[in-house]
Image (spheres, rainbow, N blue to C red):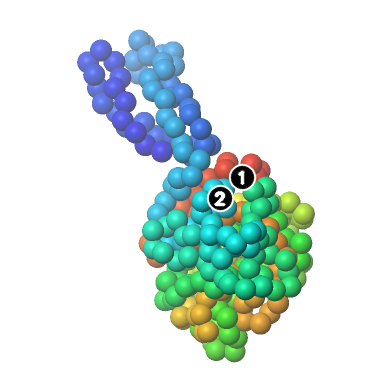
Amino acid sequence: ICFPVTIGARGYQRSVMTPMLSTGTHNIYVQAVNDPGYSIPRFVSTFTVPLNQLPVSADLWLDSSDASNFIVSGTDITQWTDKSGFGRHATMTGGACPTYSATRGVVFDGSQDYFNINLNFLAGTSHIAFIVARNYTFSGNFYGAATGGNGSNSLHVGFMNASSYRVNYWANDFGSTVTSNYRQNQYNVITYQWRPTVGKAVYANGGLEGSNTDAGAIGTMSGGGRIMNVVDQGFLEAEVKEIVMITGATATDANRIAVQNYLFNKWGITSAV
């Protein structure tokens, strides 16, 4: 975080850099190493980090922390509203609707619940997906295409099983091992990174689970995009608190770390590194 402060009697303007801060209000102090008059830290300002302000611009932002982000029928969610500003809302009608809980987030039952969503913005570019979730089953995908068997148009990203992740499109597979960075039966920040021609990586709570150097260019989603029930590879039973996706030039390691820290602070999750 960078902001200007006025220091000293002459009113010097300086930009003060801080590390990524937790949400809430913080006191900012300045200590000058070359000015005896400021050898003791001096209070200069306060800075507030809002609870619901991402540190970067997102291409998709689904946030369960505010009930106003949902359109519900009873407890069934018919729309999870995208806060990115791009209108990529997750929608469903009928018996396959996930349910909303103020404490558990978006609850997927593992047998029929999923959302339809436009994920074509992932085509032909790098992306990083951040998912805050507690899983009860591990044979299925968090996001990707509805239809399998169609090469780069059949994206599917999630878990192979309780021991392996899945970061694939048809015939371009990667499955790193689930390590102790991932905490069973707890909420985790799972990060999937896909960079065409560079490689793929998976992080659990900030710790690297695995990476490779083979990533093709994703195509548009065959049959449309989905959250859960992806390419007919089953349903995950999970509670999802938040999903954030960033793409292109925004999908850097620095921004990955910034968003992970934001999610750790927001949801009270301890970093693994």
Q: How many angstroms separate mark 2 from mark 1 (CA)? A: 16 Å
Position in image of residue 185 (x %, y %): 77, 54
Disc 1 element = helix
Disc 2 element = helix
Between circles 2 and 1, the one closer to the viewer is 2
Instruction: Check the image and report above or below for 46 versus 179.
Output: above
Q: Which mark is residue 152?
A: none
In the picture provided, is 92 more to the left or to the right than 4?
right
Q: Nearer the viewer, residue 155 or 33?
A: 155
Amino acid type of the residue tagged 1 in the rendering: Trp
The 10 Å Cα crowd at callout 2, few under 14, some 14 to 19, many 20 or more, is: some
**Residue at the image position 74 percent from the left and 73 percent from the top:** 111
Q: Nearer the viewer, residue 246 or 99?
A: 99
**Residue at the image position 63 percent from the left and 59 percent from the top:** 74
**Residue at the image position 54 percent from the left and 87 percent from the top:** 151
Farthest residue to the bottom: give it. 149
Position in image of residue 66 (x %, y %): 54, 48
Q: Quadrant of residue 31?
A: top left
Amino acid type of the residue tagged 2 in the rendering: Ala
Give the mark, 2 or 1, whose residue is nearer the N terminus: 2
Contact check, label 2 and label 1, Cβ < 8 Å: no
Task: Please give the residue where the numbered disc 2 appears in the rendered image.
Answer: 67
